[in-house]
Image (cartoon, grey):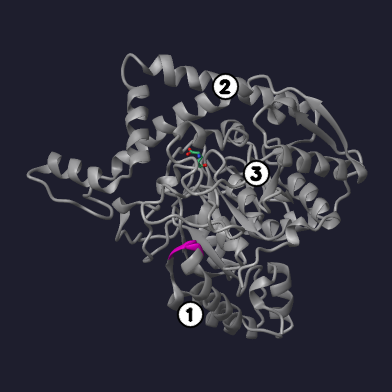
Amino acid sequence: MTDLTSLTIAGALNKLRAREISALELTEAHLARIERLDPHIRAFLNVTEEFALAQAKAADQARAAGDERPLLGIPIALKDVLSTKGIETTCGSKILKGYHPVFDATSVARLYEAGAVMLGKLNMDEFAMGSSTENSGYFPTANPWNLAHVPGGSSGGSAAAVAANLALATLGTDTGGSIRQPASFCGVSAIKPSYGRVSRYGLIAYGSSFDQAGPFARTVDDVARVLGVIAGPDPLDSTSMPTPVPDYLAALDGELRGLKIGLPAEYFAEGLQPDAETAVRAAVKQLEDMGAEARELSFQHADYCLPAYYIIAMAEASANLARFDGLRFGARVDGADLIDSYKKTRGAGFGEEVKRRIMLGTYTLSAGYYDAYYGKAQAVRTLIRRDFDALFNEVDVLIAPVAPTTAFAFGEVTDDPLRMILADVLTISANLAGIPGLSLPCGFDRAGLPIGLQILGAPFTEERLLQVGAAYQRATAWHLRSPELG
Ligand code: GLN
């Protein structure tokens, strides 16, 4: 009998529809694998076994009654930044220990409405600040390809769970690369949608003008299925766009003939791991063999992306995190008076990285520095957006590596915040401009760690990115490899 945890969503749906398996069996197989392997990987902060079994039984009953919803009976898991009604949601932080939201995030509600079965909440860097999941307030998550290496971050749990076959798909969020970079480190497929494509309602805010939720899965086809369910306008999020959601699955068969690919020279700069460059260039060659035309071009303001992003992200974070004061959400440490309680709660509840960012963000927003830092960063952001507009007038998609290196070892980068920040140098430009980015596996380095390919497009061209990614996966087998976990 096939191992039920190594199926794709497409494959599982075929078996469910043919009544070869039930949602309950599929869910139990995943729960058993989580119980066996997650003590080593630690992708989950919380496994919601009873909840999952109840949803699976309901899915089987619904199917028996003729229901054919797009994710009916499919086991998924969620980054703990997404609010889940009645289920603890910590955002990877001690300060939210014990917080049980009274509502579901819209993306979560849409997964439930589509029939998905929720297995649990996934580990992450605290408040999504980081690139390795080592900043989790609870414990680090391991990379399923090498347990001594990080899974990337901040959605490390989301990427590791899919790579280790602990869920068929997961949701993560990407503020500066946190969907694409861990997907690349763990060898899975994932998309950061355009800003405004997926509702942010119930996504605990880090950098509100950047944050987007998106799916991780083992194939681009599966990513398209989940994105189709969660995308679309939401009256509860005024920054969600009314742009209609295309039929992503229907777009996947398209041909690549005549597709214009741009290779920004600045993304292939010094510091890029040679194995990664070779793999990405081989992927471009593959796409050319399929009829695409690739050429080098230049992304003018590339050097300013990191500083602009970190100034704006920390400024927004300092404002967003002001609400965690021990009175309304999660944990509280009582002090002598109100101010003392605030200080003690925030002092004990927030980790080092979060405190560092709140301080820097508060500083850049303070009178006298606002114009010099925050105002300037916003102006630079506009220039970056215009750079992309100009590039997408010339080409259909941009292709680049996802990260300068493959997954690093635990502890290797933690003492050097600047090096950690450099892990996102190739992803954050997309967040500054609000454009979509797909990450998919395109090879392995000499140590056997996955390498990711990044495909960027103009706002609301997810359809095209998925089409290119699906064509690539029809012609290659990198996405079919799985780590040996026993
Ligand atoms: N590593 C980046 C940061 O710490 C991006 C994180 C993210 O995308 N959530 O800000």
Tell me where residue 429 appears, x and y as whole percent.
Answer: 60, 31
Q: Secondary structure at mark 3?
A: loop
Residue 353 part of the magenta-drawn span = no
Q: Quadrant of the N terminus?
A: bottom right
Q: Mark 3 = which residue?
A: 243
- Between label 1 and label 2, give the one nearer the viewer: 2
Q: Quadrant of the C terminus?
A: bottom right
Q: Mark 2 = which residue?
A: 304
Q: Residue at the location (33% across, 44% down)?
A: 351
Tell me where residue 234 appears, x and y as whole percent.
Answer: 53, 50
Q: Residues within 10 Å of mark 3 (few under 14, many from 20)?
A: few
Q: Nearer the viewer, residue 260 or 28?
A: 28
- Which numbered disc, 1 or 2, marks the residue that appears first in the sequence? 1
Q: Nearer the viewer, residue 427 or 316?
A: 427
- Between label 2 and label 3, give the one nearer the viewer: 2
Image quarter of residue 321: top left
Q: Secondary structure at mark 1?
A: helix
Question: Given the current orientation, which residue lies at the most extreme left position?
Answer: 336
